[in-house]
Structure formats: C-alpha cells, structure tokens
Image (cartoon, grey):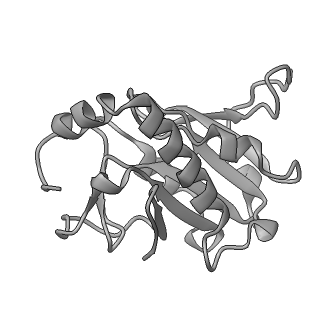
C-alpha cells in the first residue's frame, strides 16, 4: 500500500469490500484480538472501543461484547470530535446502562487497552490518522505505563513502507495477522 495522500483512496477501497468477505474478515480480526501474545486480557480493567465511522471499517463489536463483565468498556462514538466522547458500551442490546462521559482520571492505576482505528499504519506502529481525528491527543492523557494501544485495520492498510511520525501502537491486528511492535 502506498503512503501519503489524505486517505480517500483507502476509504474508497474499504467502502467497496464485499460484505461476505468483510464479515469473515471481521470474525478473524475479533479472533486475533483474543489471541495477542504478550497481552493478558485477565489483567485488563478498561477497554476503549471505537465505532466504525466509515463504510467498510472493521466492526469489532462482537469482540467487545464478548469481553468479561469485569472489564469496563467505553465506546468511542466519534473520533473526529474534540475532545473524543467515550461512553459505556452496553453489554447486550437491551442493556439500559446510562451514558457516561469517560474521564481519564477515573482509570488512574488501571490497565487500559485502546482499540485504535487505523487508516494506514506501518509495522513500527506509526499510523496515519483520519482527517480531523483527535484520538492521539486524547490517548496522550492516559499514562503510557497503563495503556496498551492496539491498531485495528484490514491487512491492506498495513504498509510495508515506513510512515512518518512517532510510533503510537503497541500491536496491530488485521484479519491475517497480529503484529507486535
């Protein structure tokens, strides 16, 4: 995949994915998330989950809904707003969990995993953010020692060419592989 541009080509490609292929790939991504070597989900207290904003982005809600109830889950409704807005993720469709604004101070000392949407990234964990995205600024408010950042994308969004910038991801999960950064 080529570096550069504003990401419109990538967004067109993911929007055109065959629905059967996409559903199969999403199931593989969810399975790969469960099996990341070096990450014990039993030690995780909080998971920050994104909601796809663009047609074709991987839907990882089955993974998030399948996490143990002991893990607090927050749903990112929109990562192109300032500041990002996180809410509790309902455990079931009929769950009436109240909406709460996520406050980084409320997770002090807890083990946090952020499932990060990726437009493009490289194997060193550098990612190209979506236009207007403020997620990186928000995640910087969480102490790095408490935070594991997992980029979630399709395998064709993983660049073999180094991207510019600072590494932001600890793992990258696609339908084909798990990359440890």
In x, y percent, where is residue 124?
Answer: 32, 74
Residue 81 makes an appearance in the image: no
Q: Quadrant of the N terminus?
A: bottom left
Of 153 and 18, nearer the camera is 18
Count of all numbered marks drawn on residues in the image? 0
Q: Residue 22, percent across and down? A: 44, 38
Residue 104 x %, y %: 65, 50
Image x and y of residue 86, in percent: 62, 36
User: Where on the picture, by quarter, is residue 60?
Assistant: top right
Q: Is residue 5 left or right of residue 178?
A: left
The residue lying furthest to the bottom in this view is 38
Depth check: give the residue in front, 84 or 61: 61
Q: Residue at x 42, y 50 (%)?
A: 137
Instruction: Say if 90 sits above or below 96 in the image.
Output: below
Residue pushed farthest front?
20
Using the image, determine if residue 120 lies above or below residue 123: above
Side of 157 where 144 appears, left or right: right
Q: Residue at x 82, y 24 (%)?
A: 98
Residue at 32% of width from left, 71% of height from top? Answer: 123
Q: Residue at x 39, y 32 (%)?
A: 56
Q: Is residue 164 left or right of residue 88?
A: left
């Amino acid at each position: 995949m080529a570096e550069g541009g504003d990401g419109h080509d990538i967004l067109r490609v993911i929007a055109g994915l065959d629905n059967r292929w996409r559903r199969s790939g999403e199931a593989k991504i969810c399975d790969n998330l469960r099996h990341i070597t070096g990450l014990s989900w039993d030690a995780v207290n909080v998971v920050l989950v994104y909601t796809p904003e663009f047609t074709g982005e991987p839907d990882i809600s089955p993974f998030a809904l399948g996490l143990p109830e002991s893990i607090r889950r927050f749903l990112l409704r929109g990562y192109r707003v300032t500041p990002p807005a996180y809410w509790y993720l309902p455990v079931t469709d009929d769950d009436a969990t109240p909406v709460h604004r996520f406050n980084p101070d409320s997770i002090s000392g807890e083990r946090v995993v952020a499932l990060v949407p990726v437009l493009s990234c490289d194997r060193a964990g550098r990612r190209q953010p979506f236009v207007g995205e403020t997620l990186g600024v928000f995640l910087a408010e969480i102490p790095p020692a408490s935070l594991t950042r997992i980029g979630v994308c399709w395998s064709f969004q993983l660049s073999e060419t180094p991207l510019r910038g600072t590494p932001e991801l600890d793992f990258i999960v696609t339908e084909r592989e798990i990359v440890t950064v």
